[in-house]
Image: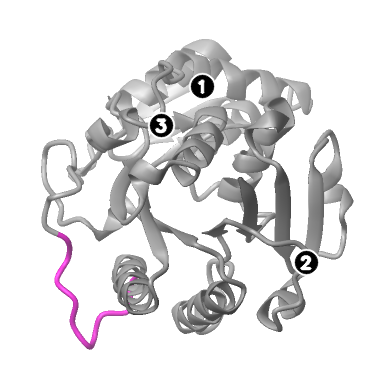
């Protein structure tokens, strides 16, 4: 497989590179589309025939190699003006590149946020949010892009794969404090305390290595074509339990507030298991992995 990946400096795309550094035989050629001009961000320890493509060159169809599969990972940063509108425009541009470059499979990275809220694991057949003309949320934008991908690909006879991503972790996510697990570690190391405001919220976490392997495995499989697949771990943990585990390993003082917010966000992964059989990294491994990374950067 010749693989083209956009948004190459983002967590998900870097998880793919992290996987390929350790398993270079999984693909033949790699194309990396990015705004960054610093090739050292990607090339270290990556012994694969690779091509670096500036975003403007990508949109201008200036690819040197041919590719079988394109993973659409580009996204405007959180908080940027007109983020969702820009993302939708870039999605349509990338679809046109795949058509003109005869790339046969388009992999769109969506989100589990498109599902309606409920209290059990999300299955791919569960109801999604209701689109309306006034909504301007992350979930709304993701679902609109899913629809655009399906309609464009069906019309132009391109295969698509929709991957609905849930929650992840790993050292590639360092400094991303909008994610609860990183914020808890950051507070534990810097303040020697951590505060869990809504202990009843339930999440699950997939390690970055498993994420990269799953994405490459699915993207290279003919059995995944034109499917919608949840990506994540089914091992649920409450924020209260997560805070307790982190406080124990860091010796930080834990404060559990009595927040009323209750939210369950865990995937059913029966489809994912068809493409990736190894046992997923458990939450204790993920916590130990993050602990070693935080320790290495010298907060103590």
| Residue that numbered label 1 is attached to | 286
Mark 2 neighbour class, 10 Å CA radius: few under 14, some 14 to 19, many 20 or more: many
Residue 188, image quadrant = top right
Answer above or below: position of 156 versus 169: below
For disc 3, the marked residue is 205
Measure the alpha-carbon separation of dots 3 and 1. 8 Å
Q: Tell me if 149 is positioned left or right of 41 in this view.
A: left
The residue identified by callout 2 is: 53
Q: Is residue 29 magenta?
A: no
3 and 1 marks in contact (CB < 8 Å): yes
Asked if marks 3 and 2 touch (Cβ < 8 Å), the reply is: no
| For marks 3 and 2 on the same chain, the one whose residue lies earlier in the sequence | 2
* Residue 190 vertical placement versus 159 (above, below): above
Question: Where in the figure is residue 205, as x and y percent of width and height?
Answer: 41, 31
Q: Residue at x 63, y 33 (%)?
A: 26
Q: Main secondary structure of the magenta part?
A: loop
Task: Decide: few, some or many residues near mark 1? Use Cα within 10 Å; few <14, some 14-19, many ≥20.
Answer: some
Q: Which residues are magenta?
A: 128-137
Instruction: Give the side of residue 213 with respect to residue 132, left or right.
Output: right
- In the picture, measured across the screen, residue 145 lies left or right of residue 87, that is left
Q: Position of residue 271 (x, y in %)?
A: 27, 36
């Amino acid at each position: 497989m010749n693989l083209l990946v956009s948004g190459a400096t983002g967590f998900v795309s870097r998880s793919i590179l992290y996987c390929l550094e350790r398993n270079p035989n999984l693909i033949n050629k790699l194309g990396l589309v990015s705004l960054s001009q610093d090739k050292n961000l990607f090339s270290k320890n990556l012994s694969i025939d690779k091509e670096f493509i500036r975003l403007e060159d990508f949109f201008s169809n200036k690819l040197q190699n041919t590719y079988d599969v394109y993973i659409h990972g580009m996204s405007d940063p959180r908080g940027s003006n007109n983020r969702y509108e820009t993302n939708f425009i870039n999605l349509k541009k990338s679809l046109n590149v795949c058509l003109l470059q005869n790339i046969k499979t388009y992999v769109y990275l969506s989100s589990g946020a498109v599902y309606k809220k409920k209290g059990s694991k999300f299955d791919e057949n569960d109801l999604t949010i209701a689109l309306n003309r006034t909504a301007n949320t992350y979930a709304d934008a993701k679902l609109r892009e899913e629809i655009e991908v399906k309609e464009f690909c069906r019309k132009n006879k391109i295969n698509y794969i929709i991957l609905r991503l849930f929650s992840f972790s790993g050292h590639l996510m360092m400094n991303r404090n909008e994610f609860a697990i990183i914020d808890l570690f950051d507070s534990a190391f810097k303040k020697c305390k951590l505060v869990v405001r809504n202990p009843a919220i339930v999440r699950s976490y997939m390690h970055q290595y498993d994420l990269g392997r799953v994405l490459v495995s699915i993207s290279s499989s003919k059995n995944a074509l034109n499917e919608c697949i949840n990506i994540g771990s089914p091992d649920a943990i409450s924020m209260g339990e997560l805070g307790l585990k982190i406080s124990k390993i860091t010796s930080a003082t834990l404060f559990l507030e009595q927040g009323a917010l209750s939210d369950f966000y865990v995937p059913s992964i029966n489809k994912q298991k068809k493409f990736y059989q190894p046992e997923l990294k458990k939450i204790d491994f993920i916590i130990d992995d993050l602990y070693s990374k935080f320790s290495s950067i010298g907060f103590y």
